[in-house]
Amino acid sequence: MSELLTSENLLALLTLALLEIVLGIDNIVFLAILTGKLPEEQRSKARRVGLALAMLMRIGLLLALSWVMKLTSPLFEPFGHAVSGRDLILLGGGVFLIGKATWEIHDKLEAATEHGPKAGGTARFGATLVQIVLLDIVFSLDSVITAVGMANQIAIMVTAVVIAVGVMLVFANAVSDFVERHPTIKMLALSFLILIGVMLVAEGGGKHIEKGYIYFAMAFSLLVELLNLRLRRKAKPVELRHVHIEDEGEAKGGT
C-alpha cells in the first residue's frame, strides 16, 4: 500500500480522476436524455443504476486489460486501412449515438408540433438500461484505454474510475433536471451527442480528432446558451411590466 501512496502515483491518480470526470461528461448528457423519457419516479434510480453499470464496466475492462489491449490489434485491412476491434466498437457506438440523437430531435420537433407537447414517461425502465449499457461499453472502452496510457498500477486506475463515477453520481440528478427544465439546453445536449457520435465514427475510421477541440466547442456553446437563458430571464419581468401597464391603460380608457 505504501508503494502506491507515492507522490508520483498520487499525481497520476489526481490527473486520471480529473480526466475520467471530463470523459464522463458525454455519459451524463446521454443519461439525462434517456432517463428524461422515463416516469419521473424512475429517473433518479435509472441514473444511479446507469452510472453504477458504467463503473462496473470500466473496472471489469481494467481487470481484463490483456483482452482490451488485443482490441487494438488489426483484424483486417480494407483499402489499406487496418481495422481493429476497438475501431468496430467505436464505429457502432458512433452510429448508434448519431441515430439516437437524430431521432430524439425529430421526435421533439415534429411529434410535438403535430400532436401538441408530449408528456414524459413513455419509455420502459429495462429498455432504457439496455441502451445505457450499450453506450457504456463504448464510453468505457475509450476511458480504459486512456487510463492505461496514463498509469501503470491497476489499483490507481480503478480508484480513479470510482472517484470519477462518485462525482458524476453527485451531479447527475442536478444536470439531468436542469436539461429537462430547459428545452433549448436539451436540444443543445442532443446536438452534443451528434457531435460525439461523429467523433467516434471518425476515430473508428482512423481519423484522430483531438478531444480538447470537441470539449472546447461544447463548453463554448453551453456558455452562450446559459447567457441566453439569463438574458431571457431578465427580459421576462420587463415584458410582464409592459403588459401590466397596457392592461391598466385599457381599463382606464374603458371607464
Image: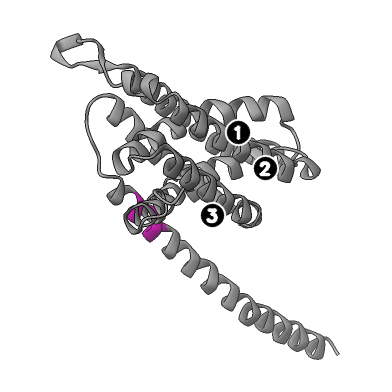
x, y (%) of residue 74?
A: 24, 14
Q: Is residue 188 left or right of residue 250?
A: left
SS of the residue under disc 3: helix
Frontmost residue, 191 versus 27: 27
Q: Is the residue 205 above or below the residue 173 in the image? A: above
Mark 3 or 1: in front is 1
Amino acid type shown at disc 3 = Ile
Label annotation for residue 253: none
- Marks 2 and 3 sit apart, C-alpha to C-alpha, by 22 Å
Frontmost residue, 156 versus 171: 156
Q: Is the residue 182 above or below the residue 83 in the image? A: below
Label 1: how many residues lie within 10 Å, few (<14), some (14-19) or many (20+)? some
Which quadrant of the figure has residue 211? Answer: top left
Farthest front residue in view? 2
Residue shown at 65%/29% (left/top)?
129
Is there CB contact under 8 Å for labels 2 and 3? no
x, y (%) of residue 96?
A: 47, 25
Q: Where the C terminus falls, by quadrant?
A: bottom right
Amino acid type shown at disc 2 = Arg
Mark before the other along the chain sequence, 3 or 1? 1
Mark before the other along the chain sequence, 2 or 3? 2
**Which contiguous range is marked in magenta?**
215-221
Residue tagged 2: 48
Label annotation for residue 53: 1
Farthest right residue in view? 255
Residue tagged 3: 185
Membership of 220 in magenta stretch: yes
Amino acid type shown at disc 1 = Leu
